[in-house]
Amino acid sequence: MIIDCHGHYTTAPKALEAWRKSQIAALADTSQARAKGALAIGDDEIRESLEGAQLKLQRERGTDLTLFSPRAAGMSHHIGDAVTSRHWSEHCNDLVYRACKLYPRNFAPVCQLPQSPGVAPANCIGELERCVNELGFIGCNLNPDPSGGYWTDPPLTDRWWYPLYEKMVELDVPAMVHVSASCNPAFHFTGAHYINGDTTAFMQFLTSDLFKDFPTLKFIIPHGGGAVPYHWGRYRGLAQDMKKPPLKELLLENVFFDTCVYHLPGIELLAKVIPVENILFASEMVGAVRGVDPETGHPYDDTKRYIEAVTWLGAEDRRKIFEGNARRVFSRLKA
Ligand SMILES: [Zn+2]
């Protein structure tokens, strides 16, 4: 079985975006009451939005199950306030739930959290509980920078985040550390902000004792771990200078990397540097990069090909990357 641990509902029916636009427009008019309202999307529209995209690609590429979450850039936690984020997250999560319900063999749900800059992450606990306990979600996406590129909130290792981590541990769900849109013009969202977010989260973990406080807390750092695998020597050296234990001991029971690296040399490096136990297969389709690589003739995000092309990975290593590690990290997937 091949589990893709990182897929977004980037093809959601237009009514979702229309609802969001009207929500944002209403923010300017403070005389209007804040209403969540309803989203009129039929099951057939959901089917149609997936059949020609994610499901078609699953079939073509030979992957089985995608861990499916709302569109990442769409989370845009910087817009409005905590109520804005709550209404929006509930709609997005409900829609992902419906998609997974229609295709339970193809998708398992991962939620977005109703974060908002300057608002304590404890505020997200209600939605996380609703998603996991009532709707069967198996993980969440956690934005380390709800401000969208200005990093105004405390680092992920600050006690500010602890109540949410306590709940994650209690519910036994991991988080993918995933930034959203960038409103800082210096950072392109998928090309810079995402990779910065991944790299920054790793360094925050490295400098802290977070996993002493939460020995079973689990994070997936997407996009191949940002710059981390390429600079593994730097991080090992920094940890050593700080009198920290080796990285393997310090972080690798808790921190995992996905394979959203869109060329073979990047995947080879990832597999060489990071223990196979810490690598989860992912493609982020349909998502960040949609084109075909003229050098190979294959889509950049067809990451299964790269892993299959790493000839020195054994059958057991591949099984871990494609399935076993995802089952271990997303332990609710069993159910
Ligand atoms: Zn993503």
Image (tube, rainbow, N blue to C red):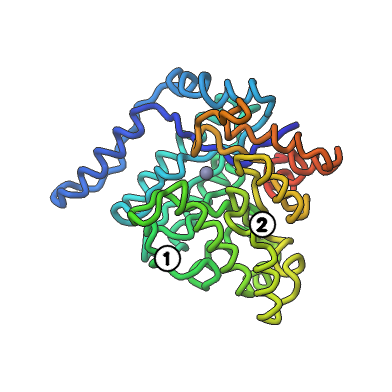
Q: Quadrant of the N terminus?
A: top right
Looking at the rendered structure, which numbered label has been put on residue 220?
A: none
Looking at the rendered structure, which numbered label has been put on residue 229?
A: 2
**Where's residue 322, x and y in %?**
74, 38
Task: Tell me the crowding category of disc 1: few under 14, some 14 to 19, or many 20 or more residues within 10 angstroms, Cα based.
Answer: some
* Residue 7 against residue 274 in the figure, above or below: above
Tell which circle, 1 or 2, labels the residue nearer the N-terminal end.
1
Mark 1 element type: loop
**Where's residue 135, x and y in %?**
55, 40
Q: Nearer the viewer, mark 1 or mark 2?
A: 2
Q: Is residue 251 left or right of residue 85?
A: right
Q: Is residue 189 left or right of residue 266?
A: left
In three-dimensional space, the C-alpha distance between marks 1 and 2, rounded to whole angstroms, equals 31 Å
C-beta proximity under 8 Å, tags 1 and 2:
no
Q: What residue appears at the point 35 percent right and 45 percent down from the top-left corner? A: 87
Mark 2 element type: helix
Disc 2: residue Cβ within 8 A of ligand 1's nearest atom: no
Q: Quadrant of the C terminus?
A: top right
- Label 1 is placed on what type of residue? Ala
Asked where in the image residue 208 lies, by quadrant, the reply is bottom right
Q: What residue appears at the point 33 percent right and 54 percent down from the top-left corner? A: 185
- Label 2 is placed on what type of residue? Pro
Give whichever of 241, 72 is nearer the camera: 241
* Residue 256 against residue 48 in the figure, above or below: below
| Count of marks placed on residues | 2
**Where's residue 124, x and y in %?**
46, 56
* Residue 193 against residue 210 in the figure, above or below: above
Residue assigned mark 1: 120
Disc 1: residue Cβ within 8 A of ligand 1's nearest atom: no
